[in-house]
């Protein structure tokens, strides 16, 4: 779980969350915790499983990729009816939208977005029907863990992925738990 591993490397966020969730109804305090919500959004921005949404071009079009300075680094022309396979989670690491896009920085979300435009749970008729349950489970689990333990992630550096098409980590990772 990416948010727990990230919290293991950032104890300052653990303590902020603990102050917000130490007492009260588990689900209510978990959902009300602004810090925990930011951690969730930032974790899912960085570690979304990729989805591919095949589309057929309705007209001829040009797709351009730009570097952070705005220079065109590639250009591809698509003919009408050609199949495209965009992967929206790449938008979560777009350096033109997110400064230091590959770094864990939950403070980049002063307000919790209502819509995650890198669509980590899909969209439209293929959206994940269990996304709200999954989010609640993550928030509750993290709240329970923080109420009972302080923890650190090993290794301490940010995890690498095998590729952006998976959330499988490139190296083994462990949590060291210490009872509060």
Image (tube, rainbow, N blue to C red):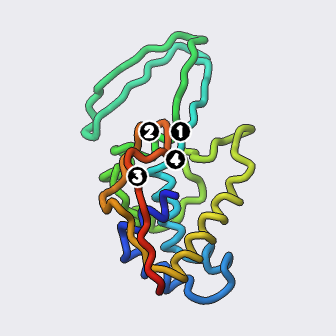
- Which residue is at a point 54% across and 60% down the rendered structure image? 113
Question: Distance of mark 4 from mark 3, alpha carbons?
Answer: 19 Å
The answer to whether the residues at label 4 and label 1 have Cβ atoms under 8 Å apart is yes
The residue at which mark 4 appears reads as 48
Across and down, in percent, residue 58 comes to 61, 17
The answer to whether the residues at label 2 and label 1 have Cβ atoms under 8 Å apart is yes
- Which residue is at a point 48% across and 73% down the rendered structure image? 35
Question: Relative to the observer, which residue lies in front, 180 or 71?
Answer: 180
Task: Say if 132 sits above or below 85 in the image.
Answer: below
Across and down, in percent, residue 11 comes to 37, 75
Question: Relative to the observer, which residue lies in front, 170 or 92?
Answer: 170
Q: Report helix, strand or loop for mark 4.
A: loop
Residue 164 is tagged as 2
Question: Distance of mark 4 from mark 1, alpha carbons?
Answer: 6 Å
Residue 176 appears in which quarter of the rendering?
Answer: bottom left
Pointer 2 or 1: first along the chain: 1
Pointer 2 or 3: first along the chain: 2
Pointer 1 or 3: first along the chain: 1
Q: Residues within 10 Å of mark 2 (few under 14, many from 20)?
A: some
Question: Distance of mark 2 from mark 3, alpha carbons?
Answer: 17 Å
Question: Distance of mark 2 from mark 1, alpha carbons?
Answer: 7 Å
- Which residue is at a point 37% across and 48% down the rendered structure image? 171
Residue 160 is tagged as none
Give the residue at the far bottom of this rendering.
23
Residue 16 appears in which quarter of the rendering?
Answer: bottom left
The residue at which mark 3 appears reads as 172
The answer to whether the residues at label 4 and label 3 have Cβ atoms under 8 Å apart is no
The residue at which mark 1 appears reads as 50
The answer to whether the residues at label 2 and label 3 have Cβ atoms under 8 Å apart is no
Pointer 4 or 3: first along the chain: 4
């Amino acid at each position: 779980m990416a948010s727990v591993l990230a919290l293991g490397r950032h104890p300052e966020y653990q303590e902020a969350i603990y102050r917000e969730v130490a007492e009260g109804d588990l689900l209510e305090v978990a959902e009300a915790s602004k810090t925990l919500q930011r951690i969730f959004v930032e974790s899912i921005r960085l570690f979304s499983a990729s989805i591919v949404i095949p589309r057929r071009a309705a007209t001829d079009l040009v797709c351009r990729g730009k570097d952070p300075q705005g220079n065109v680094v590639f250009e591809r022309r698509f003919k009408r009816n050609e199949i495209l396979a965009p992967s929206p989670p790449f938008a979560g690491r777009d350096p033109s939208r997110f400064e230091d896009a590959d770094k864990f920085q939950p403070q980049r979300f002063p307000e919790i977005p209502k819509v995650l435009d890198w669509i980590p749970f899909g969209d439209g008729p293929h959206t994940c029907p269990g996304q709200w349950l999954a989010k609640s489970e993550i928030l509750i689990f993290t709240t329970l863990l923080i109420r009972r333990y302080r923890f650190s992630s090993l290794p301490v550096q940010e995890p690498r992925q095998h590729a952006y098409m998976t959330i499988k980590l490139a190296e083994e990772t462990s949590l060291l738990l210490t009872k509060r």
